[in-house]
Image: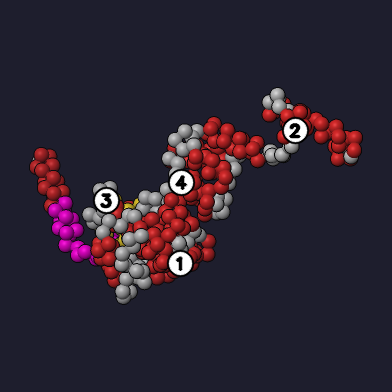
């Protein structure tokens, strides 16, 4: 009896599995399914900031009253789902106490196509001008570099528009973006500035955050973006632990040593620049130089000048050297 029971269980499990497979296969493309909210993980490297404060609270309250009205878009993966569009809705739904959320599941989606969904669906709700610098960098980089096929991109934009009940192509130009200048025309930016933002997208998360909060200038960020990830982390450590200032000139000097950057070398670069900044050049007549300093080292000559000036000011203007 036990053997028969075991066989029956295996048979029933197989039938259940086939039923689930048939049910999944029967779901038409873009059909809405109810998925466990916890089964969907964030998109890796999601470039947009999450809602906070009043905006988040308003969404939570709306979901409590009406539920999630617009389904999220996810990518099916072996161990679950990856969010493409709906990070804030998922978070608000979970905070509102919902276990499941409506979702449209995309299967066999490449990384290149997935990032198009992430960028374009977010741009439906956001104005480019209100984006943080790192968010602008992500948008511009994807639109310039990461779209493998313009025709495929058009298809995705048309689908996103349909899913959101819109006509046309989400208000975005879906024609070719073959150069930085052409892309810049859409956003009122120069091709050079487009290139700068595309460099910023190569920064480590710590530097992107500092760029967004104003602690790091765009000029310095661009120079740091040319460093490897390991070198950028060394620079971040030097800034945090050794208080090295990441101003544009220091960043340019660090970039010039790319390939040989360590936390120690960064300290030395910053110290050398600081020392150089504290000196000025004073021109002397050739006859004076030859008379007093021709046979002396630069450091010795500087020391003589300093002591001579100190003695002179002590005699002529004692208040200055007190």
Q: Nearer the viewer, residue 220 or 37?
A: 220
**Relative to residue 134, is residue 308 drawn left or right?**
right
User: Mark 2 vs mark 4: which is more N-terminal?
Assistant: 4
Q: Secondary structure at mark 4?
A: loop
Quadrant in which the N terminus appears: top left
Earlier sequence position, callout 4 versus callout 3: 3
Residue at horizontal 56 percent and vertical 47 percent from the top: 248
The residue indicated by pointer 4 is 225
Residue 268, which numbered label? none
| Position above or below: 19 against 273 | below
- Residue drawn at the location 36% of the way across and 72% of the way down: 171
Indicate the secondary structure of the residue bearing disc 1.
Answer: loop
Query: How far, Cα to Cα, is label 4 from label 3?
Result: 32 Å
Q: Which residue is mark 1?
A: 188
Asked if residue 11 lies in the magenta stretch, the reply is no
| Chain-order first, disc 2 or disc 3 | 3
Q: Nearer the viewer, mark 2 or mark 3?
A: 2
Quick check: marks 2 and 4 in contact, CB under 8 Å?
no
Q: Which mark is drawn over residue 287? A: 2
Q: Quadrant of residue 74?
A: bottom left
Viewer-proximal residue, 96 or 149? 149
Q: Comparing marks 2 and 4, which lies closer to the viewer?
A: 2
Give the spatial CA distance, label 1 vs label 3: 38 Å
Disc 3 crowd rating (10 Å Cα; few below 14, some 14-19, many 20+) is few
The residue carrying pointer 4 sits among few (fewer than 14), some (14 to 19) or many (20 or more) residues within 10 Å by Cα, namely many
Mark 1 surroundings within 10 Å by alpha-carbon count, few (fewer than 14), some (14 through 19), many (20 or more)? few
Which numbered disc covers residue 77?
3
């Amino acid at each position: 009896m036990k053997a028969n029971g075991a066989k029956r269980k295996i048979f029933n499990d197989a039938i259940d599995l086939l039923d689930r497979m048939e049910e999944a296969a029967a779901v038409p493309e873009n059909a809405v399914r109810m998925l466990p909210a916890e089964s969907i993980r964030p998109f890796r490297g999601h470039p947009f900031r999450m809602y906070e404060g009043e905006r988040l609270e308003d969404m939570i309250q709306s979901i409590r009253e009406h539920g999630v009205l617009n389904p999220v878009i996810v990518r099916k993966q072996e161990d679950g789902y990856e969010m493409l569009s709906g990070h804030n809705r998922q978070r608000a739904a979970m905070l509102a106490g919902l276990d499941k959320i409506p979702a449209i599941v995309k299967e066999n989606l490449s990384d290149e196509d997935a990032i198009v969904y992430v960028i374009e669906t977010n741009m439906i709700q956001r104005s480019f001008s209100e984006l943080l610098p790192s968010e602008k960098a992500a948008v511009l980089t994807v639109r310039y570099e990461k779209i493998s096929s313009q025709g495929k991109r058009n298809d995705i934009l048309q689908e996103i528009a349909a899913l959101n009940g819109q006509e046309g192509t989400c208000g975005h130009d879906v024609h070719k973006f073959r150069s930085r200048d052409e892309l810049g025309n859409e956003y009122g930016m120069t091709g050079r500035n487009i290139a700068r933002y595309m460099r910023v997208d190569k920064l480590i998360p710590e530097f992107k955050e500092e760029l967004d909060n104003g602690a790091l200038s765009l000029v310095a960020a661009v120079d740091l973006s040319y460093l490897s990830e390991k070198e950028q982390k060394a620079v971040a450590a030097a800034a945090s632990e050794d208080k090295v200032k990441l101003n544009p000139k220091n960043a340019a000097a660090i970039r010039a040593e790319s390939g040989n950057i360590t936390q120690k070398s960064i300290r030395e670069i910053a110290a050398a620049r600081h020392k150089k900044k504290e000196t000025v050049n004073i021109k002397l007549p050739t006859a004076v130089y030859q008379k007093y300093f021709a046979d002396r080292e630069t450091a010795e000559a500087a020391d003589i000048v300093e002591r001579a000036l100190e003695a002179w000011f002590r005699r002529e203007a004692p208040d200055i050297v007190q």
